[in-house]
Image (cartoon, rainbow, N blue to C red):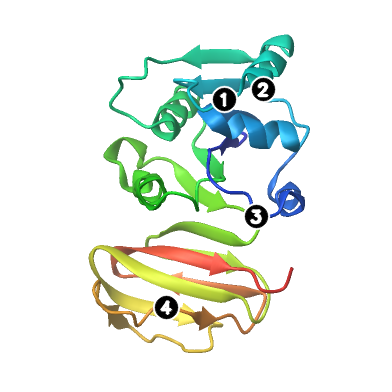
Amino acid sequence: MNRAVIFANGIVRDYGLIFPCLQSRDFIMAADGGLKHIHRLKLKPALVIGDLDSISASDLDIAEFQKTEIVQFDKDKNETDLELAIRAAMERGYREILVVAGLGGRLDQTMANILLMLHPDFRKCSFTFDDGVEEVFLARKLVEIQGNPGDLVSLVPLQGDCVGVRTENLKYPLHDETLIQYKTRGISNEMTAMRATVSISKGVALCIHTRKSL
């Protein structure tokens, strides 16, 4: 199955860095105001979803002219536009989801976006948040990070401590250690090769990969 790429209404620091994150067969979606990012990249979305309160009239006109599928919800809803977009992607069979512009801006929105990866309904999905500079995903069991020497890697425990953490090709290695949720031990490690791995025996960590070699 191909991948769904959802453009949220957060910050894009450099549009030129987004293109390397995309693939030709991606299913492009806009979560409400994320439509503006898609248009600035001169892409055509397959679906726009949300209450449409953050979309400009001109962007909406373009989407309608392109015959993009538009699903509008009432403003008085219990979910964010991104959560609705993720559900729509899953209903269409997508299990690999990339979220662009889901970071930055309002802190409440950013935190809520990231925590959606822990939603029980979405456990069968593989999520990545990426803006070309920062790549964010969950580390369960074993994950691999592709990058360059000097890139930063931070591990932030979620849902309690992370036990039995091991790393390879990071400057400050962890050997079967525990990362405590309220401590900062896992912040700002550094890749020493183009590939690094993190394994966790028990727990879930947020892995934040910051590219320094752009």
For badge 4, the amino acid type reads Ile
Disc nearer the start of the sequence (2/4) = 2
Are the residues tagged 1 and 2 within 8 Å (C-beta)? yes
> Mark 2 — residue?
59
Q: Residues within 10 Å of mark 4 (few under 14, many from 20)?
A: some
Q: In this rendering, is residue 169 above or below 206?
A: below
Query: What's the residue at 47%, 29% (across, down)?
Result: 85
For badge 3, the amino acid type reads Arg
The image quadrant where one finds the C terminus is bottom right
For badge 2, the amino acid type reads Asp
> Mark 1 — residue?
55
> Is residue 125 something one can see in this rendering?
yes
**Closer to us: mark 2 or mark 4?**
2
Q: Which mark is residue 187?
A: 4
Q: In this rendering, is residue 8 above or below 180?
A: above
Query: What's the residue at 67%, 22% (across, down)?
Result: 59
**Closer to us: mark 4 or mark 3?**
3
Q: Nearer the viewer, residue 130 or 89?
A: 130
Q: Which mark is residue 13?
A: 3
Q: Where is residue 40 drawn, in percent x and y?
A: 74, 36
Disc nearer the start of the sequence (3/1) = 3
